[in-house]
Image (tube, helix red, strand yellow):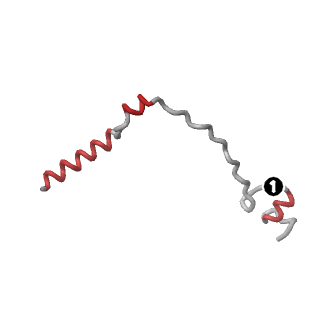
């Protein structure tokens, strides 16, 4: 295992190739700054709950009341 071995890290460095034993560094992606949403739109949807989740919660509450 040395400079001539294609499967070792040292061999990949010598050959200048990449692979499992020598993965490439992930590049850091530049993120664009967030654009602020209008305040009126936020105020309207402040109490958003998914309809399915709301229905499940209501069903659980009803089931508890019938048990008592």
Query: Quick check: 48 left or right of 65?
Result: right
Q: Residue at x 13, y 51 (%)?
A: 66
Residue 35 screen position, x and y as percent? 55, 33
Q: Which residue is under mark 1?
A: 17
Query: Quick check: 2 left or right of 42?
Result: right
In the image, is residue 25 above or below residue 33?
A: below
Name of the residue lying farthest toward the bottom: 1
Q: Residue at x 28, y 46 (%)?
A: 56
Neighbour tally class for label 1: few under 14, some 14-19, many 20 plus, Cα within 10 Å: few
Residue in the foreground of this view, choosing between 25 and 41? 41
Quadrant location, the C terminus: bottom left
What number of labels is visible? 1
Residue 13 screen position, x and y as percent? 83, 60
Q: Residue at x 14, y 55 (%)?
A: 67
Query: Quick check: 38 left or right of 29?
Result: left
Q: Secondary structure at mark 1?
A: loop
Residue 19's quadrant in the figure? Answer: bottom right
Residue 48's quadrant in the figure? Answer: top left
In the image, is residue 2 above or below residue 35?
A: below
Q: Residue at x 72, y 54 (%)?
A: 25
Residue 53 screen position, x and y as percent? 32, 44
Quadrant location, the N terminus: bottom right
In the image, is residue 45 above or below residue 4?
A: above
Query: Quick check: 13 left or right of 41?
Result: right
Residue in the foreground of this view, choosing between 43 and 27? 43
In the image, is residue 18 above or below residue 32?
A: below
């Amino acid at each position: 295992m040395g400079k001539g071995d294609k499967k070792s890290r040292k061999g990949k460095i010598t050959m200048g190739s990449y692979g499992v034993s020598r993965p490439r560094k992930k590049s850091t992606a530049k993120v664009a700054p967030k654009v602020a949403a209008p305040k009126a739109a936020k105020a309207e949807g402040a109490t958003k709950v998914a309809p399915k989740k709301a229905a499940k919660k209501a069903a659980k509450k009803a089931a508890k009341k019938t048990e008592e």
